[in-house]
Amino acid sequence: MRSLAATLASVAGLACAGHALAQPLDNPIPDPITKGSVRIELLPVVTGMAAPIDFTPAGDGSDRLFIADQNGIVRMMKGGVLSPTPFLDASSRLVSPLGIIGTHDEHDYDERGLLGITFHPGFANPSSPGFRKFYTYTSEPVAGPADFTTSAPPPVGREFDHQNVIAEWTVSATDPDRVDPASRREMIRIDQPSFNHNAGQIRFGPDNMLYITTGDGGAADDQDGQPEGPGRTSFGHGPTGNGQNKFTAHGKVLRIDPTGRDSANGQYGIPAGNPFSGPDGLRETYAYGFRNPFRFSFDSLSGDLIVADVGQNDIEEVDRVTVGGNYGWNLKEGSFKFNPNGAGAGFVEAGTSGLPPGLTDPILEYDHDEGIAIVGGFVYHGSAIPELEGKYVFGDFGLDFTVASGRLFYADLTTGLIQQFILGFDDRDLNLFVKGFGQDAAGEIYLLAGPNLGPYGTQGAVYRITAIPSPASLPLLALLAIRRRRHTR
């Protein structure tokens, strides 16, 4: 989510240094995020996972819900019961072992893995070309030339860290609760210079096209030459950075038609409304100028595309994305001018002089006093929490990488006001790392989280976000119990 150099130095023993080229803003957004009036509880519905990272219904009218674990396993919940048999096991396809620190246990960290899942809108329609089709976004070992690479090859002695792969699968004709493992069809393979900034969300939009988010190639500042470890510096970003390069697949929202075949590799189609032709930019691009748009969603009523883009060292942001838009990275971080600094320690500064026109500002933003990596969620249109109607529910991974300290927020996308949920009767801390969010067919929202840093262990869980009454309506005995707990802390 954050860059290796900027946020994992204390964890992995890395260091970055440099001299500022301009005056950084020490506190770009001084107003803190405060508690709102919405009080929620988290009801565990699935436990025993490593790092649940994506969650979706099939969209076929059944009550089945599907949960992607970062370790490569997709599990199915049916009738409120988790199936003991995986819906899909793609673990053998992933970069292995996961974990960049090297402990390969619950204390390790990685941004690679199984990162996104989705079903075709025609999944339940026998006359649709998307009948029984299911899609994944995975981080896989380098396996020959990619469909999309960087503007320059790796330097001598270096190679790409991995390749991000979009694949189509077909659900078994004899067992609707299993993917046919022999049905895999690879659509896109993208070279990734570094382990981080993979983004990885995939979803079909209201137009029935497949939207894919990609990160800027990793390391820090979307620049070559940034420190990545002992004796290593970043590559693959080119002179402008990938976010601003219209001819790379990195730092983008891509849009494709999985049922078409007019792409360069013949595996998918190019939607007619995409903004760039071959001479103008990558035909697959829908919007650009992103750093690590890890999670996005479509508002189920308005159809708006809402993208949460993980920041560098200062600002986390949420963007309302439209076709052809440029969302600023690495010229901007949030609404602020970004100075890459040339040493892996970029910062935001006051003023926007020298920036080109046409850069779109975020609709929500907060600074790193509040968290270090935004995790996008959904606009709420459920019935369980009426006061949340139309609000955007999201979170932050944690205050740092050493303590499970995630936070849960809701926001008004019109005014930009962000507030923190009150959690439980006793207004407790979450004490989990936030990994993702899900939304069921009824519009209710689920939290994907766990106390472990990376994709190991069995403490990851899925929680349904539910309403609870205000303290004023609690029975006297419950109030006394809360007071006793507070007194004994």
Image: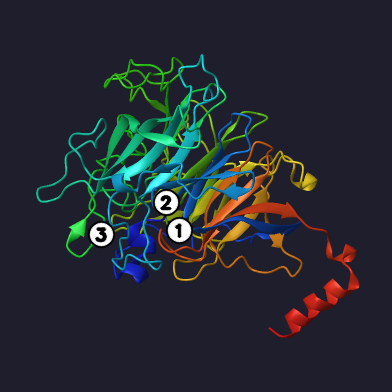
Q: Please name whichever residue, 225 or 97, is drawn nearer the observer in this view of the structure.
A: 97
Quarter of the view holding residue 362 = top right
Find disc 1 in the rendering and name its residue. 50
Q: Which residue is located at x 17 percent, y 47 percent?
A: 159
In the image, residue 131 above or below residue 103: above
Proximity of marks 1 and 3: CB atoms separated by less than 8 Å: no
Report how many numbered discs are placed on residues in the image: 3
Proximity of marks 2 and 1: CB atoms separated by less than 8 Å: yes
Query: In the rendered view, does 286 fall on the left or right side of 424?
Result: left
Disc marking residue 273: none
Dot 1 amino acid type: Ala
Dot 2 amino acid type: Gln
Query: In the rendered view, does 238 fall on the left or right side of 87?
Result: left
Residue 283 shows in this picture: yes
In the image, residue 375 above or below residue 362: below
Dot 3 amino acid type: Pro
Q: Which residue is located at x 68 percent, y 69 percent?
A: 428
Find disc 2 in the rendering and name its residue. 70
User: What percent of the width, then of the height, locates residue 81?
Assistant: 60, 49
The span from disc 2 to disc 3 (Cα, nearest Å) is 26 Å
The span from disc 1 to disc 3 (Cα, nearest Å) is 30 Å
Q: Please name whichever residue, 94 or 396, is drawn nearer the observer in this view of the structure.
A: 94
User: What percent of the width, then of the height, locates residue 314?
Assistant: 47, 57
**Of tags 2 and 3, which is closer to the observer?**
2
